[in-house]
Amino acid sequence: MKIIRTVPELSGWRAAVPSTERVAFVPTMGFLHAGHLSLLHDARRRVPSGAGSLVLSIFVNPTQFGPGEDLDAYPRNEAQDFELAESAGVDVVFTPSDPDEMYPSAQTWVNVEGLSSTLCGESRPGHFQGVCTVVTKLWMLVRPDVAVFGEKDYQQLAILRRMHADLFLGGELASMPIVREDDGLAMSSRNANLSPSARADALRLPGFRSEVLRRFGAGARDVTVLLAGATAALAPGVVDYVQAVDASSLQPVDHVVAPTLVAFAVRYGGVRLIDNVVLSP
Ligand code: PAF
């Protein structure tokens, strides 16, 4: 497995890939878990060894963290990530040695309007500009035939699909479902920052998600009914948002008449967790 830490080295590697070989790409912020591994396995399945290369990027992208967010506390473990990457069949890890490597001037930004106006776009101003900018840069450097993203960040995925189409980035953008712990908590690198008691409290998140699904299955379509009691059910978590939005436009809805995303962002012991469910009538 090749480790690349600079942009010129990555560009040089990419230029030398024969046109007969395919490139699969999984961008991450590291501290890999089973969710990331499902992306890597899917990418490796799409481009088997012998048919081309699997590239993993590990970069805790500072521009997608707002002031007071958890940039410094974001979990990191390079040695463990390299081991997991190797066992998942990764050929190349790109992990920039310094943020300046990715932001030579920090004057050029990529924004997707509309889809960024609700949910995390509203509660984390500037977050998606940081995500879109770094993914565009990575995409242009790696020039993947296919890149695979997780569906836990549903809004991120919707925005990146829009950006990928609008900027003619080429290749295919694929996604994989949320991977959960045995007790239902969605896998996230941030779970490592939960204290044992916050980890136990955080189970209220998948618990309430299941309750929303149960209500929907029992025929509820009115969003106030579907989400009734959310704040109490998620306590002691501090709710950032619990919102039902149209699954395509991501604009708020009152009734579920078309595929609807119910998205959650809740803090347990100060750790911000997200989860979601799509209700399809
Ligand atoms: O989903 C993530 O881990 C990040 O937002 C991404 C796509 C790697 C961009 O930094």
Image (cartoon, rainbow, N blue to C red):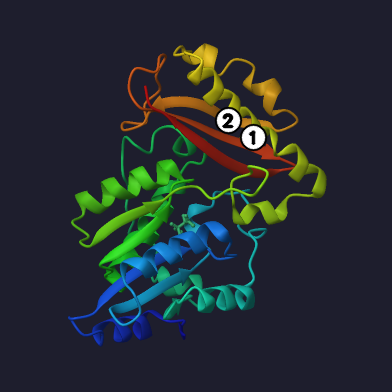
Question: Local crowd at mark 1 within 10 Å, few (<14), some, or many (≥20)?
Answer: many
Q: Quadrant of residue 81?
A: bottom right
Which residue is at a point 34% across and 74% down the rendered structure image? 48
Q: Nearer the viewer, residue 238 or 177?
A: 177
Q: Which secondary structure lies at badge 1?
A: helix
| Residue 10 picture location, percent across and down | 36, 81
Which residue is at a point 38% across and 26% down the rendered structure image? 280
Q: Nearer the viewer, residue 201 or 10?
A: 201
| Residue 54 picture location, percent across and down | 38, 74
**Rendered image: mark on residue 209:** 2
Q: Quadrant of residue 258?
A: top left
Query: Is the C terminus in the top left, top right, bottom left or bottom right quadrant?
Result: top left
Instruction: Say which residue label 1 marks.
Output: 205
**Rendered image: mark on residue 234:** none
Q: What amino acid is labelled 1 in the image?
A: Leu
Label 2 near label 1: C-beta < 8 Å? yes
Question: Local crowd at mark 2 within 10 Å, few (<14), some, or many (≥20)?
Answer: many
Q: Please state if 232 lies on the left or on the right of 32 as rendered.
A: right
Q: Is 260 placed above or below 61 here?
A: above
Q: Nearer the viewer, residue 67 or 210?
A: 210
